[in-house]
Image (cartoon, helix red, strand yellow):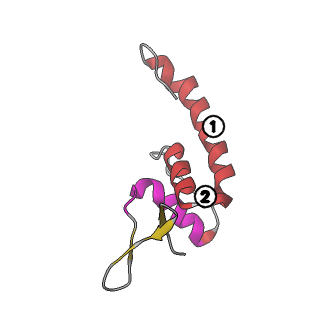
Amino acid sequence: MMFFVVIDNHWFSRVDETGAYLIDRCGAYVTPIINYLRHGQLVVDDSVNPAGVLEEARFFGITSIIPQLEQLVQVFIHIVRKFVKPFFCGDISL
């Protein structure tokens, strides 16, 4: 699969002399997407915020994974509000 960026309705990608494409994105968020494309299963490490993975999926147009990620983000928000937020003074936005 090739990734491209749309700028002013034109497709651009950076290719080096060997034909490899440069993807300048956060590896922690892109890795679950690449693994999903490899084997069709979503696996997000506990240390990775699923909202970041969701934004990368939207950026790259990987629509088949978006519903799963949206559900995972909702679960993440619920857990943070229930277990983490009580330890903070003041407001934390989610």
Q: Which span of residues is magenta-colored?
A: 24-38
Mark 1 surroundings: few (<14), some (14-19) or many (≥20) residues within 10 A: few
At label 1, the amino acid type is Val
Marking on residue 29: none
- State if disc 2 and disc 1 touch (CB < 8 Å): no
Residue with the mark numbered 2: 42
Outermost residue, bottom direction? 18
Q: Which mark sits nearer the N-terminus, 1 or 2? A: 2
Mark 1 residue element: helix
The front one of 71 and 82 is 71
Outermost residue, front direction? 8
- Residue 33, image x and y in percent? 54, 61
Residue at left offset 64%, top offset 67%: 40
- Residue 59, image x and y in percent? 52, 56
Residue 36 inside the magenta-drawn segment: yes
Residue at left offset 61%, top offset 58%: 42
Image: 82 above or below 90: below
Image: 90 above or below 58: above
At label 2, the amino acid type is Leu
Residue with the mark numbered 1: 75
Residue 33 inside the magenta-drawn segment: yes
